[in-house]
């Protein structure tokens, strides 16, 4: 490693580092920290929903002047819901998931020394860090943080007269998100350039592991759609601070007519959801990519339908940019548009179904090594199917009008993108922890973590579908003003109990994560007997990833259990073992898979 | 319930710390055949749990769900919903079985070898085409129904009603004998003219402002929605109807009520639901619940979003005519 001999200080190694492996750890730890805040918030507001008039010392302890005798105020309830959504969607599942694993795996799995631009990579992380700090600061604003829902629809988000959180809290939210978007765009561009240009010899696009395909396409969607959110946010800043009327018109509030003329909130909805919907796939595709890799490795089988998987990732990505209107069936837009969006939305079911079937077929006749990473991947397939199926109900405009914005929607998207993506993230952490920290995570704690999490996930979100079908709107501070919802209270209490247990169970993971970092068993170079390139690097991190020459690739990533006689399942392994590293040259007469 | 909750938390924390201390050497890191066997079995237990909770909810939560559609347009909605629900229900039960059964069945073992099976063109075609065919049907029915609901063009006899929203209340304005609403804008809001109706518009004079909706059974209702401050959403779950109220524009929706409030109260589904609710209310010493149609706000709109509602009463045509005749016109109220 002659070219990397410069001396490293604490600052260049751990803080302003340009090494993609360290940056990925920074993303992960920051994401976990934000995740703890986000999950804790959800536990607080779930308590409010289940026991609306009850006093809790924990609420008194955490909510300061936003509570009265241990009961939270309506404003802070909306704020908690808003910030929970923002943090989980953007800070945990976009930056925490994509940032961590794109950074870690793209150079390692394509055989590159580092990202195309290490400097921009560092900038990307520090912008993300800055936006996280601003978001956390916004929690301490006197009037409360942003409270208009994570979708921040104006006029509610534009007018402090309408809700206190739309004052300084909303300003900080917008600043934080603008910086976040900059971070995300810089990161995405870097990922795209790296995948296109820095693949090692022999690593054709058609030999890339599915993780890389997923990260690559995710980055493309991000570059296409995040700028639109940035412009939406900037126009909102103009409306709020400089008196423009992009989104506002004909408003009478606090006893006076405001000057705004000619704008429309529907414009904001279009701009927001042009990112907002692809965002779902920005969150989900990396998780699906990670799952493809892990299910294949731990099943000791090639992923079924590699090309179909790539095709479906591309189809999902393409369709995701032309379905945003299904969030707006009842926004007042032209019903004909609703028809178009129903059509495109339901089409997404096809590539999604292909993915789910391919995962299940990969399990079939495998030799499943049920490590925690594998269990989380299987869990992901389960919740992805459950949540995805209800999408057929919500994507259909005629049905959506009856249950739009009820708890049915909350249950749907939490399962299909929330729980699934979190499971994908956990699977990734358990699987690549040895690559990140050189040690292994404890499996027993992993098993407890998984089973409690999936039981609670279903305990929370399965019954939630039904209270939605009972017509219960989301974002209600309490349902006690509607006697017709009185019979839902007990179900809500059960849901909250599951949510609290599920939330607390994540302590097991956090404990396992940090204890393993220092006391876990030392990892070997290739603990899971995987095929991909990252497992050919030394356990101790070196700058440039491979000491000496870059590896050369001779085959795809999924030659697990390849046989001497392809038609005879009892024949011996072609290469003597049930895995073949991508660097292994083809034998004489061996057919590439 | 609360005690139970603390016990659960205690158990969860206790178990986790016990586990941490028990295996503090952190050497057991890769699944052995024994782990595979245990976790494979766990997958089966979990499948049992999942099926139990799925079936329990499907059967016992029927009573809490919304009763049959109270609007004629909503009938197809219910129909389409049942078809979709049966379909996804069947797929859900099969897929979850496959996922967790395969996890159990193919749990790893040193003596086993995985099947090298990378591709099957035939299978992939099957599971691309099958969903596509099913979707063609779902999309077709859905779009037909959507057009049916949203088409308000050829309803001459419709009752035109403006629903007006503000933080945090609903008002309504009937179009009067000319069945045409007068122009409204926030600039006209003054004193008791709370909906900002332009009184120089001659269509406004016979309009009637009310705080509760009365709808005649069997006639198409043509709603026009306005908002004076932020987004609200007029959600009428019993009629399968919902539309946003957007400041600066007028949005529309229509449906035909099918049952009067009285008739709805006699429906078995409604009686069963009311009975369940009243059992709970009685235990708390609250007044009994009587079914009413409601209009709820379903778009986050501020602190009291959770309490923004308006009662809807559906009556027979003659009763409606009598009621509307009694309401004062705007001309007589706003001088």
Image (cartoon, helix red, strand yellow):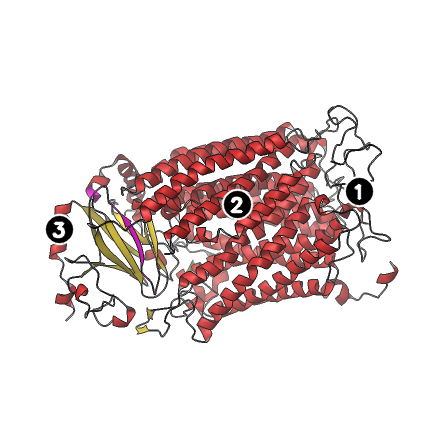
Chain that bears disc 1: A
Q: Nearer the viewer, mark 3 or mark 1?
A: 1
Q: Nearer the viewer, mark 3 or mark 2?
A: 3
Q: Is residue B258 magenta?
A: yes
Q: Can see residue A504?
A: no
Q: Position of residue A561 (x, y in %)?
A: 75, 32
Query: SS of the residue at dot 3?
Result: helix
Q: Is residue A92 magenta?
A: no
Look at mark 1 in the image and give the residue it sits on: A554
Do circles 1 and 2 both sit on a common chain? yes
Find the magenta span and give its range: B247-262
Q: CA distance from mark 3 to mark 1?
A: 83 Å
Left or right, B179 with respect to B150, comes to left
Left or right, B243 with respect to A231, comes to left
Circle 1: is it few (<14), some (14-19), or many (20+) Cα within 10 Å?
some
Look at mark 2 in the image and give the residue it sits on: A416
The quadrant of the picture occupied by the C terminus of chain A is top right
Residue at the spot 60% in from the left edge and 41% down from the top edge: A450
Residue B321: which disc? 3
Query: SS of the residue at dot 1?
Result: loop
Q: CA distance from mark 1 to mark 2?
A: 36 Å
Q: CA distance from mark 3 to mark 2?
A: 49 Å
User: Which of A221 and B1 lies nearest the eye of the viewer?
Assistant: A221
Q: Position of residue A132 (x, y in %)?
A: 59, 63
| First-in-chain label (1 vs 2) | 2
Chain that bears disc 2: A
Q: Is residue A547 above or below residue A152?
A: above
The quadrant of the picture occupied by the N terminus of chain A is bottom right
Left or right, B190 with respect to A593, comes to left
Residue A489: which disc? none
Circle 3: is it few (<14), some (14-19), or many (20+) Cα within 10 Å?
some
Tag 3 and tag 2, C-beta contact below 8 Å: no
């Amino acid at each position: 490693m002659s070219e990397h001999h410069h001396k490293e200080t604490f600052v260049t190694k751990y803080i302003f580092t340009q090494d993609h492996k360290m940056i990925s750890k920074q993303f992960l730890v920051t994401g976990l920290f934000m995740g703890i805040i986000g999950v804790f918030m959800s536990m607080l507001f779930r308590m409010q929903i289940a026991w609306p008039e009850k006093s809790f010392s924990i609420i008194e302890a955490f909510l300061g002047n936003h509570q009265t005798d241990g009961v939270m105020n309506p404003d802070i309830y909306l704020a908690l819901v808003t910030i929970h959504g923002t943090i989980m969607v953007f800070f945990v599942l976009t930056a925490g998931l994509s940032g961590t694993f794109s950074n870690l795996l793209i150079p390692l799995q394509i055989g590159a020394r580092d990202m195309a631009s290490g400097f921009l990579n560092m900038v990307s992380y520090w912008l993300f860090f800055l936006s996280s700090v601003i978001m956390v600061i916004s929690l301490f604003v006197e009037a409360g943080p942003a409270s208009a829902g994570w979708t921040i629809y104006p006029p509610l988000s534009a007018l402090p007269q309408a809700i206190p959180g739309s004052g300084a809290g909303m300003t900080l939210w917008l600043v934080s998100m603008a910086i976040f978007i900059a971070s995300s765009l810089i990161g995405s561009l870097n990922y795209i350039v790296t995948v296109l240009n820095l693949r090692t010899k022999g690593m054709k696009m058609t030999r890339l592991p599915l993780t890389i395909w997923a990260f690559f396409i995710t980055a493309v969607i991000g570059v296409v759609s995040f700028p639109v959110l940035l412009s939406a946010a900037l126009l909102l800043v103009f409306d709020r601070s400089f008196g423009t009327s992009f989104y506002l018109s004909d408003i009478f509030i606090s006893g006076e007519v405001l000057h705004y003329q000619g704008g429309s909130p529907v414009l904001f909805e279009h701009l927001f959801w042009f990112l907002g919907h692809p965002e779902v796939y920005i969150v989900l595709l990396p998780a699906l990519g990670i799952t493809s890799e892990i299910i294949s490795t731990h099943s000791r089988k090639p992923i079924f339908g590699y090309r179909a998987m790539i095709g479906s990732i591309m189809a999902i990505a393409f369709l995701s940019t032309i379905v945003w209107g299904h969030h707006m069936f009842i926004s007042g837009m032209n019903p004909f548009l609703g028809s178009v969006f129903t059509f495109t939305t339901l089409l997404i079911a096809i590539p999604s179904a292909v993915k789910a079937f391919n995962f299940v077929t990969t399990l079939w006749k495998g030799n499943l090594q049920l490590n925690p990473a594998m269990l989380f991947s299987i869990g992901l397939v389960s919740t992805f199917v459950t949540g995805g199926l209800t999408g057929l109900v919500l994507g259909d405009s005629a049905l959506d009008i009856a249950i739009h914005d009820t708890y049915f929607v909350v249950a749907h998207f939490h399962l299909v993108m929330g729980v699934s993506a979190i499971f994908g993230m956990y699977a990734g952490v358990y699987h690549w922890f040895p690559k990140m920290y050189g040690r292994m995570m404890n499996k027993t704690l992993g098993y407890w973590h998984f089973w409690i999490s999936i039981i609670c996930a279903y305990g929370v979100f399965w019954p939630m579908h039904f209270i939605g079908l009972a017509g219960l709107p989301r974002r209600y501070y309490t349902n006690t003003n509607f006697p017709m919802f009185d019979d839902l209270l007990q179900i809500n209490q059960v849901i909250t109990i599951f949510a609290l247990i599920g939330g607390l169970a994540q302590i097991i993971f956090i404990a396992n994560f940090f204890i393993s970092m220092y006391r876990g068993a030392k990892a070997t170079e290739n603990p899971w007997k995987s095929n991909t390139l990252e497992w050919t690097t030394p356990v101790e991190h070196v700058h440039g990833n491979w000491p000496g020459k870059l590896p050369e690739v001779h085959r795809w990533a999924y030659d697990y259990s390849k046989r001497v006689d392809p038609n005879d399942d009892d024949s011996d392994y072609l290469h003597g073992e049930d895995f073949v590293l991508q660097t292994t040259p083809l034998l004489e007469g061996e057919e590439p898979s | 319930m609360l005690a139970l909750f603390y016990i659960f938390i205690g158990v969860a924390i206790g178990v986790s710390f016990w586990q941490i201390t028990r295996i503090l050497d952190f050497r057991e890191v890769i699944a052995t055949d024994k782990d595979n066997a245990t976790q494979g079995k766990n997958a089966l237990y979990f499948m049992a749990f999942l099926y139990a909770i799925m079936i329990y909810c499907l059967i016992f939560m029927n009573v809490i769900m919304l009763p049959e559609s109270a609007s004629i347009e909503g009938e197809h909605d219910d129909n389409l919903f049942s078809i979709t629900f049966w379909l996804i229900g069947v797929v859900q039960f099969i897929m979850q079985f496959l996922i967790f059964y395969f996890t159990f069945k193919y749990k790893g073992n040193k003596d086993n070898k995985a099947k090298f099976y990378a591709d099957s063109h035939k299978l992939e075609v099957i599971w691309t085409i099958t969903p596509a065919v099913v979707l063609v049907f779902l999309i077709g029915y859905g779009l037909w129904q959507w057009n049916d609901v949203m088409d308000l063009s050829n309803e001459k006899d419709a009752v035109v009603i403006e629903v007006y929203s503000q933080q945090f209340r609903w008002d309504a304005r009937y179009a009067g004998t000319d069945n045409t609403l007068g122009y409204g804008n926030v600039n006209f809001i003054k004193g008791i003219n709370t909906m900002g109706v332009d009184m120089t518009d001659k269509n406004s004079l016979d309009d009637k402002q009310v705080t509760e909706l009365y709808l005649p059974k069997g006639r198409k209702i043509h709603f026009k929605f306005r908002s004076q401050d932020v987004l609200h959403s007029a959600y009428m779950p019993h009629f399968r109807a919902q539309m946003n109220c957007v400041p600066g524009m007028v949005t529309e929706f229509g449906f035909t009520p099918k049952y009067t409030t009285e008739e709805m109260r006699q429906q078995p589904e409604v009686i069963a639901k009311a009975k369940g609710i009243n059992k709970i209310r009685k235990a708390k010493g609250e007044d009994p619940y009587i079914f009413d149609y409601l209009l709820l706000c379903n778009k986050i709109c501020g602190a009291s979003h959770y309490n923004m509602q308006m009662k809807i009463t559906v009556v027979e045509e003659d009763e409606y005519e009598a009621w509307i005749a009694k309401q004062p016109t705007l001309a007589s109220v706003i001088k």
